[in-house]
Image (spheres, helix red, strand yellow):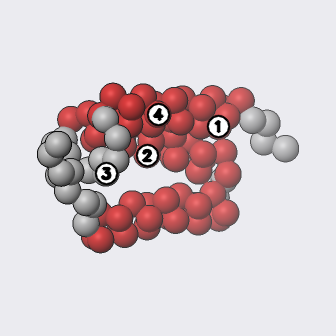
Amino acid sequence: MPQTPQTTVVVALVALLVVAGAVVFGAMVSVRAAVLVMAGIAFLGAAARLALPATRVFSVRRRAVDVSMMLVLAAALAYLGLTTPLG
């Protein structure tokens, strides 16, 4: 069984900073917009996992499982961001 390379520290830190930036954006600007940004990040993550080789992106499970899970998450976030009232 081939060994999948682990994610580098730099990639993990960049991912963490992007998510933290979306949270700060939500706190300062709009939670609804931040949820839609997170949906976009999930869509980009799914596209990256689908297109890039395993050494360049997070890879824990089979590619089809990862992409499916990220697309479901992105669709759920997009739905919530578009349907939640602004209260």
Give the distance between the C-alpha atoms of the residues marked 2 and 4, in whole angstroms.
Answer: 13 Å
Q: Residues within 10 Å of mark 2 (few under 14, many from 20)?
A: some
Q: Residue 70's image quarter?
A: top left
Residue with the mark numbered 4: 69
Residue with the mark numbered 2: 41
Q: Nearer the viewer, mark 2 or mark 4?
A: 4
Q: Nearer the viewer, mark 1 or mark 4?
A: 4
- Type of residue at label 1? Gly
Residue with the mark numbered 3: 58
Q: Residue at x 27, y 60 (%)?
A: 7
- Type of residue at label 4? Met
The N terminus lies in which quarter of the figure? top left
The spot of residue 66 in percent (x, y) is 38, 37
Query: Along the polypeptide, which appears first: circle 1 or circle 4?
Result: 4
Q: Residue at x 64, y 37 (%)?
A: 81
- Type of residue at label 3? Phe
Residue with the mark numbered 1: 81
Give the distance between the C-alpha atoms of the residues marked 2 and 3, in whole angstroms.
Answer: 14 Å
- Is disc 1 placed on a helix, strand or loop? helix
Image position of 73 with respect to 3: above or below = above
Q: Do tag 1 and tag 4 residues touch (Cβ < 8 Å)?
A: no
